[in-house]
Image (spheres, grey):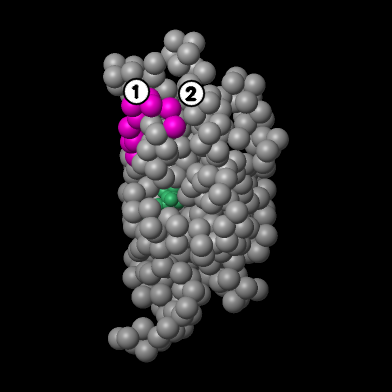
């Protein structure tokens, strides 16, 4: 079996705080403990197809643990989805990837990313490449891993956002619907909603009934409350939408033009008469530097990735289970999404606190 000498690294999908900390740990442990050389791949799978890579031999890792974004750049390119030949080279994506592996003498590849990235990593592993996946995303939706780096930082940012919005909600006696990222899952909405003292939390996992939300807010108003925070996951949907098929749902959303928070704000104002505004927290949730928790988590995962390579644990995700590093086959991760289970402890706690979920 060929010894592992050179390892490629790419970051793909939406960026997340902690990517650079993971890259740093992977390179430091990989070179110091195992003598690996590293090659950085620019802009995710785009760079892997195009051979847009650079040797990281003399890379300066100082200050990288705390640096946000990704020094490698990223893209949402999926080489296995509708593959077409490159107009310039005439090569299929997989042929471009084979050439890059040859040109840079890559013995292994580490892919840092979320669901899409790890699905592609799984397909690369099935195509015979030595691949390892790392769980990065503010959405915390990767099956097989309790945690993903980026998530805790995003909770903090979103929680601070909710706190800021509460003060203006109070001044104006308003309801504020605050849209929180998370793609098709509600982890970020749930955690930030609880930490940010939201009155209502809307999650994709729990389709909402506007009548229930209105009744809840009116009751609070009768008791003297005059400002309300509705933490609304970007993937939240109502009970009617929940019945739709994927295509119909997409159509309804495309027709909406504005994002979900604006619709919920309108619905609340109409149903309650309470003046309501919408606010989208947006990309600040995944921009900026990682918090200390994510710096440490990403460092642990990056370091473990170097061990995985040395132990030839290819075709696996470097997952976290019960606080320990675990190897989870990428094919068990690919194409799946980790939703909030209805018996999630924080969800149950939130219900006990009296937070309304619109159900
Ligand atoms: O996956 C991270 C994430 O920020 C999601 O929360 C969000 O739905 C999506 O990426 C936004 O993607 P884009 O950067 O392509 O707009």
Dot 1 crowding, Cα within 10 Å, few <14, some 14–19, many 20+: some
Judge whether residue 102 can be spotted in this image: no
250 or 300, which is in the foreground?
Answer: 250
Q: How many marks?
A: 2
Q: Is residue 210 left or right of residue 65?
A: right
Reading the image, the residue beneath label 1 is: 174
SS state under label 2: helix
Disc 2 Cβ-to-ligand 1 distance below 8 Å: no
Compare marks 2 and 1 and give the one earlier in the sequence. Answer: 1
Q: Quadrant of residue 278?
A: top left
**Residue 297 x/y as whole percent:** 52, 39
**Residue 236 x/y as whole percent:** 50, 44
104 or 95, which is in the foreground?
Answer: 95
Q: Which residues are magenta?
A: 271-281
Q: Image height check: is 214 above or below 66?
A: above
326 or 209, which is in the foreground?
Answer: 209
For residue 31, which numbered disc appears in the image? none
Name the residue: 55% across, 38% down. 209
Reading the image, the residue beneath label 2 is: 217
């Amino acid at each position: 079996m060929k010894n592992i000498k050179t390892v490629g690294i790419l970051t793909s999908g939406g960026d997340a705080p902690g990517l650079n900390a993971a890259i740093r740990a992977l390179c430091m442990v990989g070179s110091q403990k195992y003598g690996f050389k590293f090659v950085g791949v620019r802009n995710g799978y785009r760079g892997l197809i195009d051979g847009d890579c650079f040797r990281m031999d003399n890379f300066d890792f100082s200050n990288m643990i705390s640096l946000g974004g990704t020094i490698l750049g990223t893209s949402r390119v999926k080489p296995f989805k509708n593959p077409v030949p490159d107009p310039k080279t005439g090569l299929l994506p997989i042929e471009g990837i084979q050439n890059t592996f040859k040109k840079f003498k890559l013995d292994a590849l580490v892919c840092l990313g979320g669901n899409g990235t790890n699905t592609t990593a799984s397909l690369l592993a099935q195509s015979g490449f030595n691949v390892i996946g790392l769980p990065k995303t503010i959405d915390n939706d990767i099956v097989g891993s309790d945690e993903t780096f980026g998530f805790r930082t995003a909770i903090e940012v979103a929680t601070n956002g909710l706190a800021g919005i509460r003060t203006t909600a109070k001044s104006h006696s308003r309801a504020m619907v605050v849209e929180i990222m998370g793609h098709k899952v509600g982890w970020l909405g749930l955690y930030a909603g609880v930490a940010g003292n939201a009155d209502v939390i809307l999650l994709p996992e729990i389709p909402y009934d506007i009548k229930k939300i209105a009744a809840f807010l009116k009751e609070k108003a009768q008791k003297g409350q005059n400002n309300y925070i509705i933490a609304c996951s970007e993937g939240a949907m109502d009970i009617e939408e929940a019945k739709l098929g994927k295509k119909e749902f997409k159509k309804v959303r495309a027709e909406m033009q504005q994002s979900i928070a604006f619709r919920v704000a309108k619905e609340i104002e109409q149903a309650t008469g309470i003046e309501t505004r919408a606010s989208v927290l947006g990309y600040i949730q995944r921009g900026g530097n990682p918090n200390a928790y994510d710096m440490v988590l990403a460092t642990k995962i990056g370091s473990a990735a170097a061990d995985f390579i040395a132990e030839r644990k290819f075709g696996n995700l470097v997952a976290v289970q019960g606080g320990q590093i675990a190897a989870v086959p990428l094919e068990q991760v690919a194409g799946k999404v980790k939703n909030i289970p209805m018996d999630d402890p924080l969800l149950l706690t939130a219900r006990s606190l009296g937070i309304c979920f619109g159900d």
